[in-house]
Image (cartoon, rainbow, N blue to C red):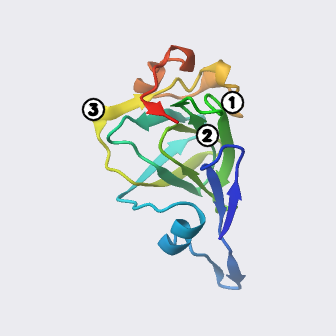
Amino acid sequence: MNVIKTEIPGVVILEPRIFTDPRGYFFESYSKRVFDEEVCKIDFVQDNESCSTRGVMRGLHFQRPPFCQAKLVRCVRGAVLDVAVDIRKGSPTYGRHVAVELTEENHRQFFIPHGFAHGFAVLSDTAVFQYKCDNYYAPEYDGGISIQDTDLGIDWRIDPAEAILSDKDTHHPLLRDFDSPFTF
């Protein structure tokens, strides 16, 4: 597993070693030992999966303390642009983001630690998206930042004005109007 550091410490991209032969391919998608040694010690407790069509944008989501969630995400079918935004008060990278294309061909995974808002845009006709979480979903601790906040400077590679959003995702505040529950 190749661990690629990003410009925001703690946010990493993981590239598996893929073995191919005439039968197809094989790769190790997760190893607790490798993750603990190369990224951070973590216990994932819940796996989730979504299926979305082209133009769907989900996010930018997080859970408030004490039910914060770190996530390890990947796209197993199709392609998405996946984004993590630093929302930790006092962080030198507050408001900055890391974006990575996750596809069924590149098999990349993206790790989003606590204190980050997370979202993605579907770039293919359909996308099946999976993620591991280190805490259980607690709807009363749900939070979000507007995925259409242009001040974040995210190039979603689709027009946010034409994006397909949930009703919930149209009501999140802009980052400048947000009082973060996270500290650096």
10 on left or right of 173:
right
Q: Residue at x 56, y 29 (%)?
A: 90
Residue with the most extreme bottom position: 22
Asked if the residue at tag 3 contacts the one at tag 2, i.e. Cβ–Cβ closer than 8 Å, the answer is: no
Looking at the image, is mark 2 or mark 1 earlier in the sequence? Answer: 2
Rendered-image quadrant of the N terminus:
bottom right
* Helix, strand or loop under label 3: helix
Numbered mark located on residue 154 in the image: 1
Q: Quadrant of residue 105?
A: bottom right
Residue 156 picture location, percent across and down: 68, 33
Q: Are circles 2 and 1 on residues that touch, CB within 8 Å?
A: yes
Between the C-alphas of marks 2 and 3, the distance is 23 Å
Q: How crowded is mark 3: few (under 14 residues within 10 Å), some or many (20 or more)?
A: few
Can you give x and y, in whole percent of width and height, for residue 158 in the image? 68, 31
Between discs 2 and 3, the one toward the N terminus: 2
Helix, strand or loop at label 2? It is: strand
SS category of the residue bearing label 1: loop
Q: How crowded is mark 2: few (under 14 residues within 10 Å), some or many (20 or more)?
A: many
Q: What residue type is labelled 1?
A: Ile
Dot 2 corresponds to which residue?
83
* Label 1 CA crowd tier, 10 Å (few <14, some 14–19, many 20+): some
